[in-house]
Image (cartoon, rainbow, N blue to C red):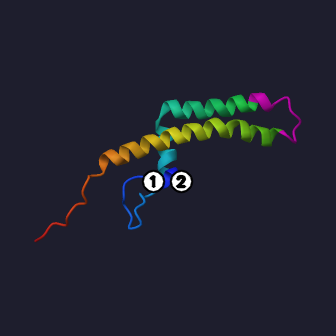
Amino acid sequence: MGLLSGRTARPDGRAEPLSMAALLGRTLRSPVELGGILLSVFVAAVLVSPLPPVLQPIVGLLLAAVPGMLLLDRVRRRLKRERDREEPDEPRQPASR
């Protein structure tokens, strides 16, 4: 899975996964992604308005989820690049006294 690949940070060789809090925090600070998510929700609401009330929630979720997940994946990739840039190539040695 893409969330678990990266530099070795755990004994089994997998990197620490990104938390949902980090993803949502970065998304809320980015005007492009936040605007894209809000726009996709608005467009989904407009498109489902002529449908019967039984179908509106289901179709609305599907219409808003696809672009929202694409935007969150874009944020996740950016966070992974930043995290990989910040990590040193070699682990730090504890300071000896």
Contact (Cβ within 8 Å) of mark 2 with mark 1: yes
Residue 5 image label? 1
Q: Amino acid at mark 2?
A: Met
Name the residue: 54% across, 34% down. 34
Q: Amino acid at mark 1?
A: Ser
Position in image of residue 65 (x %, y %): 67, 40
Name the residue: 68% across, 37% down. 64
Residue 1 image label? 2
Q: CA distance from mark 2 to mark 1?
A: 7 Å
Does residue 57 appear left or right of residue 6 in this picture? right
The span shown in magenta is 46-55
Name the residue: 87% across, 39% down. 53
Name the residue: 74% across, 32% down. 45
Does residue 67 appear left or right of residue 5 in this picture? right
Q: Is residue 44 magenta?
A: no
Position in image of residue 50 (x %, y %): 85, 29
Q: Judging from the image, what secondary structure is the residue with disc 1 in? A: loop
74, 11: nearer the viewer: 11
